Image (cartoon, rainbow, N blue to C red):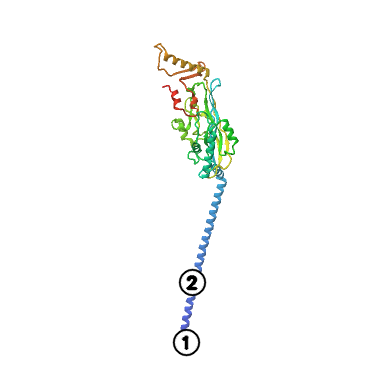
Amino acid sequence: MDKINDELGKRNKIRRCRKEISVLNLSNETHANKQKSENERKFSVRLTGFFFLTFALFAILIIRLALLQFVDGPALKQKETSLGYRTTAIAPIRGTIYDAGNHKIAYSTSRQSLYFNVNKNYKKKENIAEAKELAEKLVERFKSNTKTGEEKQSVEDIVKRMDLNANVNPVHVPRLIKTDLSPKDIAYFLEHKSEYKDLEIREDSVRNYDQDTVAVQTIGYLKKFRGVRESYDYYKEIYENRNSRLEELKYLDYEDVGVDGLEFMFQEELRGKNGLKKFPVNVTGRIMGPMELTKPERGNNLHLTIHKSIQMKTEDAITNTLQKIRNSSNSVERAPNARTGYAVAMEVKTGNIVAMASMPDYDSNVWKNGSISVEDYEKINPL
């Protein structure tokens, strides 16, 4: 019996152990299932979050593309176009100054000038050699057509004017080689245009004054803008604010501007508006297509109340009086150092100034090129 009881006890223990093991395995399996379910839930949440984030990013991208296309598109297109072009201004033709009888006292005429366009990369040796060869041909051409008193140009002078490395001006700005071309030169370059593809004949403006020197002190004269933009407050302000001015109103360094008399007083009215040459260029600044031209607008004319005939008689009267009192034997009127005289004549009924003379005068045409020689200045200086 004892053995039987021991055997039964052992079997009961085994059953209890198996039952405990079964319960433990069931507990572990339940825990594993819970853990798996939790992992699956977290994965599902992450996956949902990923898809939502991806959708949001794509939505933002689509909205941004739509804004670029439909809202910012026109402005960006205009900016792209402007970046693809370079503009060169053409100086306007100055208005004419007339006397009361519609006689021209100051007027502008045209002259033809030769310009060089930088259409190649002159960092390459073969292009530099080609430019020097062109300069040699131009020197040979101008040698037989140089006007009296005109300084002859050398090959080095012309190459310097070409400014091949854009040290002075950007590549899209034409370089002035020679001004006031003769009819023979104009005909020659037009006939041989295929040989001189980088050269261009352009029309420049020259200011002329009446040869009788009518009211020169009143009319005034011109100088180059680059020479007066620092010394005259009026032009200094224009130069400092140049970026805020419209292209057609921007002053050009080589244009003539009034610095005295009516030429200065009515500068804006007489000047006119710039013309524009628009060149399509690539990212390196090289010209890639045909030019678009907007012609310059001529300045307004100025009509004075001064009569040339009365003005000339007034000037003669001052000159004769000065000569008389310098050489007079009458001690009362004698003035040996008298050099200057002034006179103004006015119509009493209208108040119009018909003569305004200041003597001695000078020939305003000495300023034709925007400057004056020391010799000419000494001639007109009364002191």
Query: Can residue 279 be seen by looking at this rendering?
Result: yes
Q: Residues within 10 Å of mark 2 (few under 14, many from 20)?
A: few
Residue 75 x, y percent position in the rendering: 55, 43
How many numbered marks does the figure carry?
2
Q: Residue furthest right?
A: 191
In this view of the protein, which residue sits in the foreground, 127 or 97?
A: 127
Q: Which mark is residue 28?
A: 2
Identify the mark nearer the N-term, 2 or 1. 1
Q: Residue at x 44, y 26 (%)?
A: 375
Check if mark 2's residue and mark 1's residue have beta carbons within 8 Å.
Answer: no
The amino acid on which the numbered mark 2 sits, given as a three-letter code, is Asn
Q: Circle 1 sits on which residue? A: 4
In screen coordinates, is 195 left or right of 264?
Answer: right
Residue 344 x, y percent position in the rendering: 47, 18
The amino acid on which the numbered mark 1 sits, given as a three-letter code, is Ile
In this view of the protein, which residue sits in the foreground, 200 or 25?
A: 200
Residue 285 x, y percent position in the rendering: 53, 43
In this view of the protein, which residue sits in the foreground, 277 or 234?
A: 277
In the image, residue 279 sits, relative to residue 382, either above or below, namely below
Which quarter of the rendering shows the C terminus? top left
User: Comparing marks 2 and 1, which lies closer to the viewer?
Assistant: 2
Q: Residues within 10 Å of mark 1 (few under 14, many from 20)?
A: few
In this view of the protein, which residue sits in the foreground, 48 or 157?
A: 157
Q: Residue furthest bottom?
A: 1
In the image, residue 28 sits, relative to residue 248, either above or below, namely below
SS for tag 2?
helix
SS for tag 1?
helix
